[in-house]
Amino acid sequence: MGKYIHMYISACFTDWSVFNIYLSFAGFDIGGQVAIGFSHWKSPFPGNGQNLPSPDCVRSEASAVPPISEHLEPVSCPASLSITPLPTLSASQETLCDSTFPVILLLYTLLIFPPAVKGVNVLLGRQRSEGISSPSRDDDSTLLNQGTHSSILDDNTNKSSGLCFADGKSRIDYILVYRKSSSQSEKREIFERNIRAEGLQMEKEASITNSDVIFLKLHAPWDVLCRYAELMNIRMPFRRKIFFMHRRHKFMNRMEKRINKFRGWLPRKPMKFDDTLPDLEENESFTAPFSRSRIHHFIIHNKDTFFNNATRSRIVHHILQRVKYEEGKNKMGLNRLLSNNSYEAAFPLHEGKYHSKNSIRTHGAENHRHLLYECWAWWGVWYKYQPLDLIRRYFGEKIGLYFAWLGWYTGMLFPAALVGLFVFLYGIFTLEHCQVSKEICQATDIIMCPICDQYCPYLRLSDSCIYAKETQMDMCKHLTLFYSCLPATVFLEFWKRRRAVLAYDWDLIDWEEEEDEIRPQFEAKYSKKERMNPISGKPEPYQAFTDKYSRLIVSASGIFFMILVVIAAVFGIVIYRVITVSTFAAFGWALIRNNSQVATTGTAVCINFCVIMLLNVSLFLLSLRATTEQPRTESEWENSFTLKMFLFQFVNLNSSTFYIAFFLGRFTGRPGAYLRLINRWKLEECHPSGCLIDLCMQMGIIMVLKQTWNNFMELGYPLIQNWWTRRKLRREHGPKAKASFPQWERDYNLQPMNAYGLFDEYLEMILQFGFTTIFVAAFPLAPLLALLNNIIEIRLDAYKFVTQWRRPLPSQAKDIGIWYGILEGIGILSVITNAFVIAVTSDFIPRLVYAYKYGPCAGQGRAGEGCMMGYVNASLSVFRVSDFEKRSQPKTTGSELFGDAVKYCRYRDYREPPDSAEPYSYTLQFWHVLAARLAFIIVFEHMVFAIKTLIAYLIPDLPKDLRDRMRREKYLIQEMMYEAELERLQKEKNEKKKKDKAHHKEWP
């Protein structure tokens, strides 16, 4: 009996501090495994003990109902940090915790009526109880969680106007908005009549600012929520999780004390949230699909808060999607009514205001929205981890997964950014020791041929010294060979593991997406052709095979046409570069004239950015019309639209970069025999220091400008629109009018979420992921720029979701959908492109060939900086000026720069001199370099693909401890349900015996 006394003393202390409870009082041997019943209960409110405001939407009759389950009710009083042999308290024990009787009476009660702990058995040393064992942890760590499935803030709804019906009790679960002047009143009346038939409660109210706008408020009573929660298989909590902790050795305890003493000098987890804030982690409870027949098994403190607000809104939306709006016809669903303007808007309510005069750290959180703003959307917490569980509870699993993926992607950019920064700094610090850049900067006697027709002058090779040094800073390719491709694979593999953990924590492992309803456009197009659905057994519109594939051909033709439009835009940029370089070469300003090629590249990139942004809008509108294959469901349409838009925007964003990386300066011919565009314009050549500087400028400028523009449009556009709406309201109703508006009025004045959901958010990040990984070997700072942008992006998106947008419908999803396949495709493409960038665009392979075959270290098996002496001279060919074509002959002879007229000039290539037996033909070194480049591409790709496959094999998609926990939990759920059912049957049997006995006594 001593163990029960010990547990109740430790569990019912009113002091919040941690007490030293001696297990000797209970007389137990703790040499083995012990179970943690309750540990270090953390107050969800600030240290001053001030609670949240009392709820204003709580039904009196619901609150008066006693707990449905007596033996499954979790403890609500604080528990001390003590090792106890009992896992939980029953409802009767919870009452004792709240009692004001003296401790003596408590002990006396326990001695007389020892409590029976049901459903969970606990191991204590070598002692085993009968029944089910609690789940254990393989990593010797302890998972200590208290509370129920619902958030604490669900029990304390914000006490502000506009969250309830006029009675102040019924919570508003959904809002529909329509105009009285709309011509669809008949459909609305039928729809609303059927809504009432489903059991939903309704209340209408006119807008304060416009009497023509009507708000239809919907509330789902308890019986409706239970009925549809069972139909939708919503998982609800019915048992708190309890884990085991192995007793540590004394030596480990001493080591931990020393480590903690050392860590005391360091900041404690600066990226974690403050301990004084509410617990933002999801509470650990066993869950099961809700069942009304087993309602007594679930943990129900209060009927009004058992289903949280997001779940309530999801249930109401599920009902609205299945309510008919025309009598005698199979036409139903809110989406169709929104598409034909029967209703103007539909949305769940935000939970009050997001901003408060008082900080959450001093006065506590007023509601979930306020908590999200302070802990997530506020710029002051930019370095903190995201409260994913709170995001999920408020916005749903689909949006929660997006922010989880974005945070995971941002975290994986840290090592890539550090490596890229190290490579960049290494190039700076080794700049003065680079033999190649030294030779270029000292080559004052080497005269380079003009890079354009007639107007471009002869140049000294030393004039490109600065650009040669900049190129050398990116030439540390031996440090980025595998770094450039493997992070994408590691990121994807670890994301699968992270997604599995989130799916388990959020009860999405066994979740299956419901069958999508037919799109209104599909129904309108094929309403005359129907066939029986083999699954539902109901007639539905049908698209013939020939019609479907003819539309696919038309859609594919549209895609091909739009890709040709993008290629034509790139072709225009190429012509601009060819013409402008000659114009700048004849410019009167010496700074532009001497840097004509760099100026051309810079202006071309800026023009290219403007073309990209214009084409993005045009391609978006065209892609909407290009989806002519008429997908049957919303998910099919979304997948088709996503693939098209990604393909268009990927080609639009990267086409110019591919041109610079793999085509610029590769097909220009040679002096005296240039290849020309339309037999007129000479194709652009690379700078004497190489083409890598052009690629770096292209990537840097496009990346910075695009990310800046996207961030401005994401936040600036809704801010401006909401500011204009507030300005109109102040003019019409006074400066303090908005403060008196109910919540539905304030939310209606916010901007609706994009009609395409998270498409734009994912698309922006996926394109950035491609831009970062595909050409990272040429621009090692790309991950750093992406990291800085994503840190801002997370807070911008959070601020937008919390403050500027209406609350989106909380929806479920177990992964990021089709985007994961696109990410895998980008990862494969990045291997190929980086192999070509290293082998073709850079001088990495030519330098290796020279060092091992032609340099001073040839045949010695080494390739240091000393082996690169003479490389610049060996990489340049000689051209006789008299062999120039007439239209290419420079207008100047070079005498103004070099004293005498130039007779010979140099150009980048491996060709024979003009006085050789085969003038201007390729040398043997050219073929050696070409063979080495092809060999490197083949070996590099196969090696990286082999390593990627090995990494994917070695990293399991499901962590072992999670797999064990899932199996253990499945077993425990079955056992707990079985035991609870046996207990119920036994209770019914005993009651029946008592009735029979009483009836026997009453018999005469």
Image (spheres, rainbow, N blue to C red):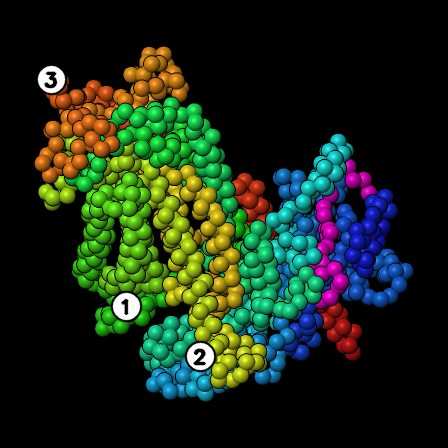
Q: Which residues are magenta?
A: 28-51
Mark 3 = which residue?
Answer: 917
Q: Secondary structure at mark 1?
A: helix
In the picture, residue 457 is in which quadrant? top left
Mark 2 = which residue?
Answer: 177
Q: Is residue 40 magenta?
A: yes
Is residue 279 placed above or below 26 in the rendered structure?
below
Mark 1 = which residue?
Answer: 522
In the picture, residue 674 is in which quadrant? top left
Along the line of sight, the residue nearer the viewer: 880 or 990: 880
Identify the amino acid type marked 1: Phe
Identify the amino acid type marked 3: Ala
N-term mark: 2 or 1: 2
Could you give the CA–CA distance between mark 2 and mark 1, rounded to whole angstroms? 25 Å
Closer to us: mark 3 or mark 2?
3
On residue 499, the disc is: none
Q: Secondary structure at mark 2?
A: strand
Say which residue appears at 43% left-offset and 31% top-offset. Answer: 427
Tag 3–tag 1 contact (CB < 8 Å)? no
Say which residue appears at 47% left-offset and 46% top-offset. Answer: 787
Residue 694 percent location from the top left of the image? 31, 40
N-term mark: 3 or 1: 1
